[in-house]
Each structure stands twice: as structure tokens, then as C-alpha cells.
Image (cartoon, rainbow, N blue to C red):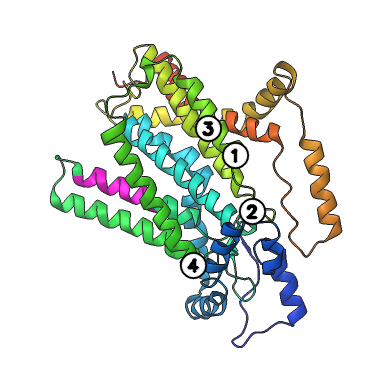
């Protein structure tokens, strides 16, 4: 685990020039002129208004963190923060599908995907800084997350949509007793407050970040249920031959028209990943419906947990093999050689290395992602639901570990 600083004694202070170097190394901390010259008037005005809530937060948050920090809590909140990472979702979202609960996975993918996209878009649009470190101590396993803007918190957005979805499933169940519903509701709220409160404890987010992230989660949840109930209630993706084309075209359109941040920030990478998962899910659903197959069929628990555990032993390695072994060389080779997509990775890498050489203490201006990386990452993550929904059931059927 990386902790940016060790715990400091009460009354800690740093020389002004050292503190300024630390501040400018993180995105969003440059003076207003840095952003005014590169933003539209409305975008800059919104940023300046919201900046009032982040400019004075760091000292108060540091005092709170210092008062409550212990080694045990450091470890606990560092580990539980991984419950909001995209790697966790890639490996854990398939679990309900392997139990036959495809509709839960379907809803979860949409809610997580678009909450990540909306929160990432607003992060890059507002360009607001995280709470400053120092004085705060950032407790995290990944330095990657410290290089993002602050508001809205994607962890808070994720936790909110997951909590609302689980609560809606818990309380809509007619088979569970009131006691069971209350017990699972308490567990769900514990998950929410652990993940959200941990972002403040770990020095990663302030109150504006948490509140705005939670509002993004509520917005995505309400919008999804409105569309499902009133707009897309009778829509079947398999009835239309053009559905996968529209899915991929829409996904790439919202990715390539994504707002450009001012400073370097890796938020966009998560948006590409989750939008890819959504599109892969839609294409998989379309394929199954066209083949007169039911997603999740034959993967219930009617024959006990043993078959489910066997499906995990087969399915999880298949996902890992696709995501971490096969996909990257296969996808990039196809893009370069079969589809003649220009490989612009070297150009972007050279620009980043030049920016690092120019200054090691100031966050550079946004360089942008290589186009081939956007397309490649999109396809790689689209392949995850294809593996879960199409490939895994074929493997389960061949090994006779289905429930039907």
C-alpha cells in the first residue's frame, strides 16, 4: 500500500515553495488564469463557483483525518476502496450471471457504466482539484487515482447506484421476510457508507466530491428506471438487425466527443472501459435473442451450490484469460493489420515523456489518448460481457455443469 506521507505530528507545516510544488503536481491546482484561457466562459464560471467549496476544505479535512487516523483504519479503508475499482467490477459482476440472475447484472452494468461516464465527464469539464496533499495524507493502493480531478467522486456515484439497485431488489422481493430485508438493507448501507466515508478518510475526496458523485448516482438510477418503465418497456434488442451497429456507433460517438480536460487526467480511461462493457453487453444480448437463447438460462442454483462453484472455477479464468492474456495482442494486431488503424501510441508517448522532462513538479497540459488505444480498450472491455454471456455458457454446457 502506498501512503503519500507518514503521519506527521500536530502542528505540521511545510515551506511555502515545497507546498506549492506538491500542489501543482496534481491536476486542477493551477491559478484561475491557467483555466480561463482554455475554457469557455460558461465552463470557467461554473468552475470558479464550485471552487469556493474546495479552496478551503483541505485544512479542515486534514484535522478530521488526523483525529481519527489509525493503522487498522488505514488498512481497512485502503482495502475496501477496491470495492469501487473497475477491476473489482470486472471480476465480480459475472457472479450473479453465473447464478442465473442475468437481469441484475444487466441493470448493474448500465448503472455503473453511465455513472462512471457522467462523473468522468463532469470531472474533466469542471477540472476541480482533490483535497490537497499535503496537508492531507492520501491512502491508496494505486497512485493512478491520485492523478484524477476531484468532483464528482466516481466511487460515490458507483456506491450510490449499487446501493439503490440492491435496495430496490431487496424490497421488491415477495419471498423474503421483513427481517431478511432489513438485514440485507443494513449490509447494503454498510457497504455504501464504508466506500463513501472511506474516500474522505483516505484523503481522496472532499464533501463536494462525495455529494456531487452521489447526485450523479441518483440521476443515473432514476433515468435508467424511467427509460426502462416508460420508453423501452417493450423494446427487444434482438428484433432489430441494426441494434449492435447503433450500440457501437453511439458508444464511440460519446467517447470521441468527450470533453477535453485542461490538465493530464486518467479519468477518461475508466469511461472507455465501462462504455465498452455496456456495448459488449448489448451486442451479446442481441446475439442471444437472435439465436432464440435466454441470457442466464441454465445457470440457476436448482441443483445446489456445487455446480455454481464449478462454473466459477471455469468462468473466472476464462474472463481473466480474455482480459489479461489474449485480448490486447489480438485486438491491437487486428486493428493495425486488418483494419489499418494508424498506430499513434508512439507519438502520444513521446509527447508525455517530453512533458515529464520539461517539468517533474507541475502537472502537464492534457495530451490526449491515442485513438487506437480508445478503440482497442473499448473492444477489450466489450469482450468481457461477451465472454461471460456467450462463451462461458458454451463452456459450461460442454463440461455439463449447467443447472438444467
Q: Which mark is in front, 4 or 1? A: 1
When the figure is inspected, residue 250 is found, relative to residue 127, above or below; the finding is above
Check whether the beta carbons of the residues at disc 4 and disc 2 lie within 8 A of each other. Answer: no
In the picture as drawn, the residue positioned furthest to the bottom comes out as 11
Check whether the beta carbons of the residues at disc 3 and disc 2 lie within 8 A of each other. Answer: no
Q: Gap between marks 1 and 2, in whole Å?
A: 24 Å
Q: Gap between marks 3 and 2, in whole Å?
A: 24 Å
Q: Gap between marks 4 and 3, in whole Å?
A: 32 Å
For the question of whether residue 337 can be seen, the reply is yes
Q: Gap between marks 1 and 3, in whole Å?
A: 10 Å
Residue appearing at x 51%, y 39% in the figure: 274
Residue named by callout 4: 200
Residue named by callout 1: 257
Residue appearing at x 42%, y 52% in the figure: 216
Disc on the earlier residue, 4 or 3 = 4
Residue 20 on image: x %, y %: 73, 74
Q: Is residue 167 magenta?
A: yes
Q: Gap between marks 4 and 2, in whole Å?
A: 17 Å
Residue range in magenta is 160-171
Say the numbered circle drawn on residue 290.
Answer: none
Residue named by callout 2: 144
When the figure is inspected, residue 372 is found, relative to residue 130, above or below; the finding is above
> In this orientation, which residue lies closer to the viewer: 256 or 93?
256
Q: Residues within 10 Å of mark 1 (few under 14, many from 20)?
A: few
**Quadrant of residue 371 within the rendered picture:** top right
Amino acid at each position: 500500500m502506498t501512503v503519500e506521507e507518514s503521519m506527521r505530528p500536530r502542528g505540521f507545516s511545510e515551506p511555502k515553495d515545497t507546498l506549492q510544488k506538491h500542489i501543482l503536481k496534481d491536476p486542477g491546482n493551477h491559478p484561475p488564469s491557467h483555466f480561463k484561457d482554455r475554457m469557455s466562459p460558461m465552463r470557467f464560471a461554473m468552475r470558479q463557483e464550485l471552487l469556493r467549496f474546495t479552496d478551503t476544505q483541505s485544512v479542515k479535512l486534514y484535522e478530521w483525518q488526523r483525529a481519527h487516523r489509525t493503522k487498522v483504519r488505514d488498512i481497512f479503508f485502503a482495502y475496501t476502496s477496491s470495492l469501487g475499482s473497475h477491476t473489482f467490477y470486472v471480476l465480480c459482476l459475472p457472479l450473479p450471471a453465473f447464478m442465473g440472475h442475468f437481469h441484475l447484472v444487466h441493470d448493474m452494468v448500465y448503472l455503473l457504466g453511465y455513472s462512471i461516464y457522467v462523473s468522468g465527464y463532469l470531472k474533466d469539464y469542471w477540472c476541480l482539484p482533490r483535497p490537497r496533499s499535503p496537508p492531507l495524507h492520501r491512502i491508496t493502493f494505486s497512485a493512478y487515482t491520485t492523478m484524477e480531478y476531484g468532483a464528482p467522486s466516481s466511487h460515490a456515484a458507483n456506491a450510490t447506484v449499487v446501493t439503490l439497485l440492491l435496495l430496490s431488489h431487496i424490497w421488491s422481493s415477495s419471498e423474503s421476510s421483513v427481517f431478511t430485508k432489513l438485514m440485507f438493507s443494513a449490509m447494503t448501507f454498510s457497504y455504501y457508507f464504508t466506500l463513501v466515508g472511506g474516500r474522505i478518510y483516505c484523503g481522496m475526496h472532499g464533501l463536494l466530491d462525495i455529494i456531487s458523485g452521489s447526485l450523479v448516482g441518483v440521476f443515473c438510477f432514476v433515468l435508467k428506471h424511467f427509460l426502462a418503465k416508460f420508453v423501452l418497456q417493450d423494446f427487444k434488442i434482438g428484433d432489430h438487425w441494426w441494434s449492435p451497429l447503433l450500440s457501437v456507433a453511439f458508444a464511440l460517438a460519446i467517447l470521441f466527443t468527450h470533453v477535453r480536460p485542461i490538465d493530464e487526467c486518467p479519468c477518461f480511461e475508466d469511461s472507455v472501459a465501462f462504455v465498452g462493457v455496456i456495448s459488449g453487453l448489448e451486442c451479446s444480448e442481441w446475439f442471444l435473442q437472435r439465436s432464440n437463447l435466454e441470457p442466464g438460462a441454465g445457470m440457476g442454483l436448482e441443483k445446489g451450490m456445487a455446480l455454481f462453484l464449478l462454473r466459477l472455477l471455469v468462468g473466472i479464468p476464462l474472463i481473466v484469460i480474455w482480459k489479461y492474456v489474449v485480448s490486447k495482442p489480438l485486438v491491437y494486431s487486428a486493428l493495425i493489420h486488418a483494419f489499418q488503424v494508424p498506430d499513434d501510441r508512439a507519438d502520444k508517448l513521446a509527447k508525455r515523456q517530453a512533458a515529464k522532462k520539461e517539468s517533474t513538479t507541475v502537472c502537464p497540459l492534457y495530451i490526449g489518448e491515442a485513438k487506437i488505444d480508445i478503440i482497442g480498450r473499448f473492444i477489450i472491455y466489450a469482450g468481457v460481457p461477451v465472454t461471460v454471456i456467450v462463451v462461458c455458457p458454451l463452456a459450461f454446457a460442454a463440461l455439463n455443469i449447467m443447472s438444467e
